[in-house]
Image (cartoon, rainbow, N blue to C red):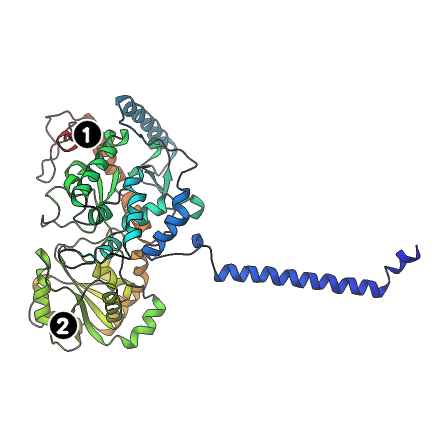
């Protein structure tokens, strides 16, 4: 008893208190260290990655092995039959009737419901691994000298959209789109076929064969047969890709770099603003945010900057004329350049030292240079009469770009005098808008609100009612009947679709 009473002496209690406080302090230090370490070295899934190569590396190593969804979707693995089509039609009608009566915003409300096909790996992961295993070693270029793997990066919108759609909902940040796992629940169907990688990295005949296989696989799906592809989304962002089979998917929504109404890249009637969507190229330079714009302002001593190839085909012939007109003009830099790593650094440095960046047409009406200029804080000077711009239903490009006609731009002295006539306050307004707009053109993983992935689904949502109209109309109008649309750009409607048999045989 005496020993137990001694343990409660003031001296013993003091030692116990000191020991307790020491243990608490040590534990607190461990917790704070762990917390600071987590901040300095965030988990890959918590870090926003804007580099295509770096994001793809993380995707293939960390996400690809876990791609098998806990929800088994109802993608048809073999050829579907009429029973599959009738079953789907019945379920879709039941769902739409229910939504019409219960959801006030139907059918234009958010989020857009997208079904992602689970295609065989030869159309998806195998192609991503092919790029990953070859981009460091190869130095091959196209006939005009453009680095092949850099072109694939510029047109990698198919990767950014797919990687976001198939990520676990807990990791996704977009509220404009949700992935569904039943076809009857979908507003749209996304086809995750990497058309650009296959075009550039496969042998010609191998590529054509893969295109035909992908076409047959998709057109065998009951959802395709129901709408004739009108609610299906194809990423066809390089104008050379998927070319041999395009005519069989002309009803689908194409994700394009531009429209090119000249007919050099797309056949008449294949593309239109009504059904298709223009998406920005992936920028080749780092973003200059508001802080960067403020810091770079004193260094922007060049009036007008251009670095690239001056000899182009089709509408791009204006480049040579502008080069001749602007060569040697004070405060104007016009130089030949390539898209390689050295070219990237030179272009980025030149854009961050300039007030205006010349963005004429290339082989197509659009050019990746436009988006490089925007994210660099360099006011684009657009001289491309046939150009269609991404997200123009949402964004006002007059706030961030000087848009001129080609005929004015090549007049002696006109363009430089026009730019110099812009008062400093107007230039400041352009730059302020550029700082705000640049985030709309930065692809990232995870995809960010108001980034290009988010803007894509906001634009596609606006097409939903028109797609439903034409889908239902195609189901009731009989072959050979008169079309109610009598314009040259719209062919008579018919339940008979183009036969695939000559191609697929």
Tell me where residue 64 appears, x and y as whole percent. 38, 45
Q: Please name the residue shown 35% across and 33% down the image.
A: 185
Dot 2 or dot 1: first in sequence order is: 2
**Quadrant for the N terminus in the image:** bottom right
State the CA–CA distance, disc 2 to disc 1.
53 Å
Question: Can residue 449 be seen?
Answer: no
Whether residue 94 is situated above or below residue 364 in the rendered picture: above
Place of residue 312 in the rendered image (x, y in percent of width and height, measured from the top left): 10, 59
Disc 2 designates what residue? Answer: 416
Q: Secondary structure at mark 1?
A: helix
Q: Nearer the viewer, residue 484 or 170?
A: 170
Q: Quadrant of residue 359?
A: bottom left
Displayed quadrant of residue 395: bottom left
Horizontal arrangement in the rendering, residue 118 relative to residue 472 (left or right): right
Determine the residue located farthest toward the top in the rendered image.
83
For label 2, the SS is helix
Residue reaching furthest to the front? 137
| Quarter of the image that includes the C terminus | top left
Q: Are marks 2 and 1 in contact (CB under 8 Å)?
A: no
User: Residue 489 location, x and y as percent?
Assistant: 10, 40
Q: Is residue 445 above or below residue 476?
A: below
Residue at 43%, 52% in the rendered image: 45
Q: Residues within 10 Å of mark 2 (few under 14, many from 20)?
A: some
* Mark seen at residue 474: 1
Q: Residue at x 37, y 42 (%)?
A: 178
In this view of the protein, which residue sits in the foreground, 148 or 396? 148
């Amino acid at each position: 008893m005496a020993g137990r009473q001694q343990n409660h002496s003031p001296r013993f209690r003091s030692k116990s208190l000191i020991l307790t406080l020491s243990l608490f302090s040590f534990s607190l230090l461990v917790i704070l260290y762990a917390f600071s370490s987590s901040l300095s070295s965030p988990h890959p899934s918590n870090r926003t990655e804007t580099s295509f190569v770096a994001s793809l590396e993380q995707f293939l190593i960390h996400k690809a092995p876990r791609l098998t969804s806990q929800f088994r979707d109802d993608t048809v693995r073999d050829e579907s039959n009429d029973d599959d089509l009738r079953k789907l039609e019945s379920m879709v009608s039941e769902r739409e009737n229910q939504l019409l009566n219960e959801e006030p915003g139907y059918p234009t409300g958010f989020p857009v419901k997208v079904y992602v096909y689970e295609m065989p790996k030869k159309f998806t992961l195998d192609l991503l691994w092919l790029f990953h295993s070859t981009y460091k070693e190869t130095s091959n270029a196209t006939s005009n000298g453009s680095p092949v793997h850099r072109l694939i990066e510029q047109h990698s919108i198919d990767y950014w959209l797919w990687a976001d759609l198939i990520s676990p909902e807990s990791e996704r940040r977009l509220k404009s789109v949700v992935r569904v796992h039943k076809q009857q629940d979908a507003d749209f169907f996304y086809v995750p076929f990497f058309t650009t990688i296959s075009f550039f990295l496969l042998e010609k005949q191998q590529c054509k064969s893969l295109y035909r296989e992908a076409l047959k696989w998709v057109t065998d799906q009951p959802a395709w047969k129901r709408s004739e592809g009108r609610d299906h989304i194809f990423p066809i962002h390089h104008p050379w890709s998927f070319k041999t089979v395009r005519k069989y998917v002309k009803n689908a929504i194409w994700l394009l770099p531009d429209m090119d109404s000249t007919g050099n890249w797309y056949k008449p009637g294949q593309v239109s603003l009504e059904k298709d969507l223009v998406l920005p190229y992936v920028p080749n330079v780092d973003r200059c945010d508001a802080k960067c714009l403020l810091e770079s302002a004193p260094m922007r001593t060049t009036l007008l900057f251009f670095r690239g190839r001056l000899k182009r085909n089709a509408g791009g012939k204006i480049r040579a004329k502008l080069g001749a007109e602007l060569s040697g003009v004070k405060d104007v830099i016009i130089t030949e350049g390539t898209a390689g790593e050295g070219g990237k650094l030179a272009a980025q440095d030149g854009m961050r030292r300039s007030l205006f960046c010349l963005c004429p047409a290339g082989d197509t009406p659009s050019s990746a240079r436009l988006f490089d200029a925007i994210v660099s804080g360099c006011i684009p000077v657009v001289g491309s009469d046939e150009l269609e711009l991404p997200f123009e239903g949402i964004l006002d490009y007059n706030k961030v770009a000087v848009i001129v006609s080609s005929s004015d731009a090549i007049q002696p002295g006109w363009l430089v005098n026009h730019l110099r006539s812009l008062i400093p306050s107007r230039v400041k307004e352009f730059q302020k808008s550029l700082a705000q707009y640049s985030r709309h053109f930065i692809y990232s993983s995870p995809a960010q609100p108001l980034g290009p992935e988010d803007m894509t689904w906001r634009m596609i949502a606006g097409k939903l009612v028109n797609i439903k109209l034409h889908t239902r109309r195609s189901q009731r109008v009989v072959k050979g009947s008169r079309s109610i649309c009598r314009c040259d750009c719209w062919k008579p409607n018919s339940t008979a679709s183009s036969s695939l048999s000559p191609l697929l045989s």
